Image (cartoon, rainbow, N blue to C red):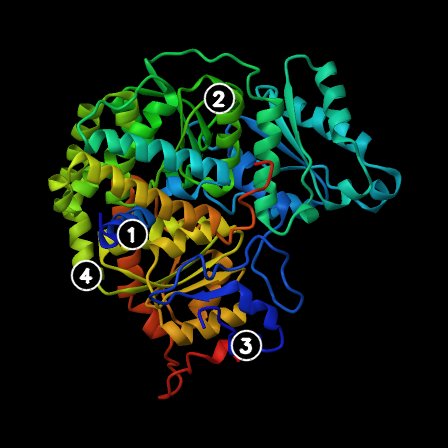
């Protein structure tokens, strides 16, 4: 795992993915967890969970993301399962920092929508 | 110094917190414009009021509903037909406007009787219409008229009608945004779940935050029909009142305008467990991505790919013709909020256009997080911009075309800068594949229109009129 590769994935997500910017901290956390979990399954050849409507939502977002990542970053195909899990873990940490813990958005922790 | 204090703002230095210049190497952990905050005294805001957000943007779009505005006549006229959202039933909602026309004596003695009389009168005059939204406005809210009680009385007298009340006077919030919120939350709490829809397809969804501007909804509906997806409710483009009461039965909520309608999608997820999928409906790349996500959710990827291939074959050559001629154009987007982040990357990727300045009237910080993540370095991002700031920004970035509303558009025209209506469009629809070609065509026509240069020339003299005359 290299920070440069995590940065590449992070820059892609920042530019393309609306799900990281939902209204509240708990929405953002739910999306980041769910979509990156589905992406990990797709990138490592595992069957993604499709049992619930939320599973199918995460799968839909992850499927498009994984397709783009494979096209933009061919090195991802050569990464092993352990390396992919590390990369996505690093991506999750960075997304969480930017969009939740260090976000300057004052509405993130409002109790209501 | 990514937060910018413009020269024209030197006497209102608080404005520095609202204007951001993106710089490489910095990000939204360091700087994020203040947004959804009260307009600063001394700045001439372009914002609308909270009532306008509820009525003009969302409620007024419904095609089978009387929009009873309980207030002075101006509140009705100023939120009527300034946004062109047609319907497939002869545009009922654009032909008529309703008001209780409150005068001084009604304010002094109370307006509830007048409201009740007006509601009956409207239903009597239009006996085929059985649905109504009643809006309070600033004066009727201040005198404490109980519009819910009046609506209840009218519904008791007329069992076949249904009335929704929206208590969101103009002063309720800092901008239109509050009106979006009040209508969203009121509707989901009081009306959703009251009616069971007829389910006609295996796959169902609500399409939220699309108001059929010049036919957007009707254009996108062709895609959903081809995919075999039943749209239970469009919130609220080309929609019936009762469609929106059945939103609880959809399997998926697809959200375009997250600012004006994200609230109802959030509440539907919380209350009924319906997932929320946010997409961009403007732009080729984005529209294809949205169709792919919806198709993946329902497991109909093949149909989705076939639709995308068909639309690309039909419209991409036309888009490319415009791209060839628009490449390098500098564009400013001064609209409500979400179109900043919907458009900045789509015009860049699909048309080669560079967005150099963006201003939002009612966006929240969430909208600025999105647009700063997507937008370019060297671009200005402005919250609640005012006219003097617009003049200064124009000098700084020298845009070739500005997408904004008709009011600011008039200002821009006086500077002989091409303007395209970014709210209600020039010649839409602009959503979807065909729509984005329409947007490109309007941008091309605006930029290459020779009239602007001719208008800058005074035929009575050899000297040309100084472009900045209108600003001085």
Q: Which residue is mark 4?
A: B325
Residues under labels 4 and 2: Cα distance?
A: 43 Å
Residues under labels 4 and 3: Cα distance?
A: 35 Å
Residue B106 in sight? yes
Going 42% across and 37% down the picture, which residue do you hit?
A: B212
Q: Which residue is mark 1?
A: A11
Q: Which residue is mark 3?
A: B8
- Residue B8, picture quadrant: bottom right
Residue B131: percent from the left, percent from the top? 60, 23
Residues under labels 1 and 3: Cα distance?
A: 35 Å
Same subunit, labels 2 and 3: the answer reads yes
Q: Which residue is mark 2?
A: B247
Residue B448: percent from the left, percent from the top? 26, 65
Q: Residues within 10 Å of mark 2 (few under 14, many from 20)?
A: many
Q: Earlier in the sequence, mark 2 or mark 3?
A: 3
Same subunit, labels 1 and 2: the answer reads no
Going 45% across and 79% down the picture, which residue do you hit?
A: B468
């Amino acid at each position: 795992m290299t920070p440069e590769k995590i940065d590449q994935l992070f820059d892609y997500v920042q530019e393309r993915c609306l799900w990281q910017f939902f209204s509240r901290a708990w929405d953002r956390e739910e999306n980041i967890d769910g979509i990156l979990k589905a992406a990990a399954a797709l990138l490592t050849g595992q069957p993604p969970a499709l049992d619930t409507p939320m599973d199918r939502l995460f799968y839909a977002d992850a499927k498009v993301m994984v397709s783009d990542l494979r096209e933009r970053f061919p090195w991802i195909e050569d990464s092993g399962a352990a390396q992919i899990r590390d990369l996505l873990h690093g991506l999750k940490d960075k997304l969480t920092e930017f969009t939740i813990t260090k976000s300057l958005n004052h509405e993130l922790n409002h109790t209501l929508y | 110094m990514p937060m910018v204090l413009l020269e024209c703002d030197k006497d209102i230095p608080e404005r520095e917190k609202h204007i951001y210049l993106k710089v490489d190497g910095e990000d939204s952990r360091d700087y994020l414009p203040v947004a959804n905050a009260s307009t600063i005294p001394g700045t001439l805001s372009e914002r609308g009021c909270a009532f306008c957000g509820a009525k003009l943007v969302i409620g007024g779009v419904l095609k089978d509903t009387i929009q009873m505005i309980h207030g002075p006549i101006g509140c009705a006229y100023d939120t009527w037909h300034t946004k062109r959202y047609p319907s497939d039933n002869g545009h009922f909602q654009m032909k008529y406007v309703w008001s209780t026309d409150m005068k001084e004596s009604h304010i002094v003695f109370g307006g509830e009787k007048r409201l009740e009389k007006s509601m009956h009168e409207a239903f009597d005059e239009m006996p085929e219409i059985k649905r109504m939204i009643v809006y309070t406005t600033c004066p009727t809210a201040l005198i404490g008229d109980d519009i819910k009680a009046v609506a209840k009385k009218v519904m008791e007298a007329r069992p076949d009608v249904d009335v929704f009340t929206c208590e969101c006077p103009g002063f309720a919030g800092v901008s239109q945004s509050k009106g979006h919120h009040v209508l969203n939350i009121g509707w989901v709490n009081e009306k959703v779940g009251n009616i069971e829809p007829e389910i006609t397809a295996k796959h169902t969804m609500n399409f939220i935050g699309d108001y059929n501007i010049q036919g957007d909804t009707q254009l996108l509906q062709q895609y959903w029909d081809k995919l075999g997806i039943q749209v239970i409710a469009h919130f609220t483009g080309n929609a019936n009142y009762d469609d929106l009461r059945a939103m609880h039965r959809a399997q998926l909520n697809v959200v375009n305008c997250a600012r004006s309608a994200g609230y109802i999608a959030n509440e539907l997820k919380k209350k009924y467990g319906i997932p929320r999928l946010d997409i961009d409906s403007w732009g080729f790349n984005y529209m294809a991505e949205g169709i792919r996500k919806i198709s993946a959710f329902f497991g109909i990827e093949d149909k989705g790919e076939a639709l995308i291939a068909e639309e690309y074959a039909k419209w991409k050559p036309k888009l490319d013709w415009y791209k060839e001629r628009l490449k390098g154009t500098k564009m400013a987007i001064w609209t409500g909020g979400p179109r900043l982040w919907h458009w900045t990357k789509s015009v860049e990727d699909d048309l080669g256009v560079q967005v150099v300045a963006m201003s939002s009237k009612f966006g929240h910080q969430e909208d600025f997080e999105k647009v700063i993540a997507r937008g370019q370095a060297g671009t200005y991002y402005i919250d609640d911009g005012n006219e003097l700031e617009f003049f200064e920004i124009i000098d700084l970035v020298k845009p070739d075309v500005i997408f904004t509303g008709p009011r600011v558009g008039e200002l821009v025209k006086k500077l002989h800068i091409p303007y395209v209506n970014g709210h209600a469009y020039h010649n839409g629809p602009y959503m979807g594949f065909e729509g984005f070609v329409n947007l490109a065509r309007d941008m091309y026509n605006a930029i290459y229109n020779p009239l602007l240069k001719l208008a800058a020339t005074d035929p009575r003299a050899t000297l040309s009129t100084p472009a900045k005359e209108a600003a001085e």
